[in-house]
Image (cartoon, grey):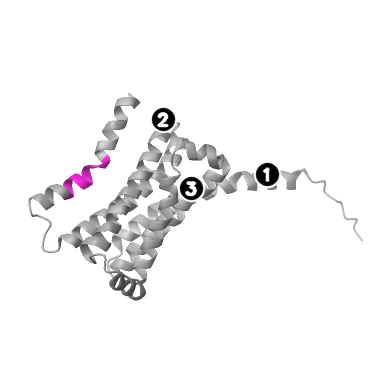
């Protein structure tokens, strides 16, 4: 089942791009097609980042170990749509005008935060293969790939600062991200607190004589 299901998931991840292509072909992207493409790809970056981060909690809570097979794919699709998002900005919006882009970055902080989130995804995409896991070692590879947390946070902040007034959508993404990161903090801190409490209970009590 998993073998044939993986190509289906792969094709499903391309549906957002196919829909944009279909709208562009039929000239139905609206009065500002660049804005539509930018917002659509931006939304799918966050969605794939959250889906990627959701794989581990769902796998552990439900016992569906096979889900881990799709985590890498979802993460790479987050990078794929981030690349499209970035190319839309530097190519379709700014026409590779470096001076204009630098002026935009200095004027609009949300662009700087968004670009930071994109840059953080680059080493994750480059080291996503099994070969890189062997080269870096499991612990170092895991430490490096925790950059996804900061990339997702940067993405939510980027969206929040972009919309300014109507923060409903970034707030929704931020709430989901908070739950996913909160789960990880709980999993990390739980055993440490349990060990600390166990040590406290096992320490001998010193009776203080009454005076």
From the viewer's perspective, is 188 left or right of 183? right
Q: Residue 109 in the image: state x and y as whole percent.
A: 37, 71
For label 3, count other residues whose C-alpha is less than 10 Å away and answer few (under 14), some (14-19) or many (20+).
some
In terms of secondary structure, where does tag 1 sit? helix
Task: Residue under label 3, please give it.
Answer: 145
N-terminal label among 1 and 3: 3
Q: Residue 182 got which mark?
A: none
Q: Residue at x 37, y 59 (%)?
A: 156
User: On the image, numbered disc 1 is attached to which residue?
Assistant: 195
Find out whether the residues at labels 1 and 3 contact each other: C-beta distance under 8 Å. Answer: no
Q: In the image, residue 127 lies at what x, y percent?
A: 45, 44
Where in the figure is residue 8, as x and y percent of width and height?
Answer: 26, 32
Up the image or down, 132 lies above or below 64; here it is: below
Gap in Å between the C-alphas at discs 2 and 3? 20 Å
Residue range highlighted in magenta: 13-20
Q: Nearer the viewer, residue 92 or 20?
A: 92
Tell me what residue is drawn at x 30 percent, y 73 percent: 99
Q: Position of residue 176 (x, y in %)?
A: 38, 52
Q: What secondary structure do most residues of the magenta stretch adopt?
A: helix
Q: Nearer the viewer, residue 6 or 89?
A: 89
Residue at 42 percent of width and 35 percent of height: 68
Q: Which mark is residue 66?
A: 2
1 or 3: mark nearer the eye? 3
In the image, 190 versus 67, the foreground residue is: 67
């Amino acid at each position: 089942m998993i073998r044939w299901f993986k190509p289906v998931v792969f094709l499903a991840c391309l549906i957002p791009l196919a829909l944009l292509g279909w709208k562009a072909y039929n000239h139905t992207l609206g009065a500002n097609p660049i804005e539509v493409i930018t917002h659509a790809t931006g939304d799918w970056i966050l969605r794939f980042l959250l889906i990627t981060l959701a794989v581990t909690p769902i796998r552990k809570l439900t016992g569906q170990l096979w889900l881990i097979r799709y985590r890498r794919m979802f993460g790479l699709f987050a990078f794929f749509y981030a690349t499209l998002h970035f190319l839309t900005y530097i190519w379709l919006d700014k026409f590779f005008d470096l001076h204009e882009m630098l002026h935009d970055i200095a004027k609009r902080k949300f662009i700087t935060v968004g670009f930071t989130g994109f840059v953080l995804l680059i080493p994750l995409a480059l080291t996503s293969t099994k070969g890189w896991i062997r080269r870096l070692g499991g612990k170092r590879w895991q430490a490096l790939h925790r950059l996804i947390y900061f990339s997702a946070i940067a993405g939510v902040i980027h969206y929040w600062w972009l919309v300014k007034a109507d923060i409903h959508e970034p707030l929704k993404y931020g709430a989901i991200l908070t739950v996913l990161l909160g789960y990880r903090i709980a999993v990390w801190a739980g055993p440490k607190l349990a060990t600390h409490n166990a040590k406290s209970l096992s320490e001998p009590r010193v009776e203080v004589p009454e005076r």
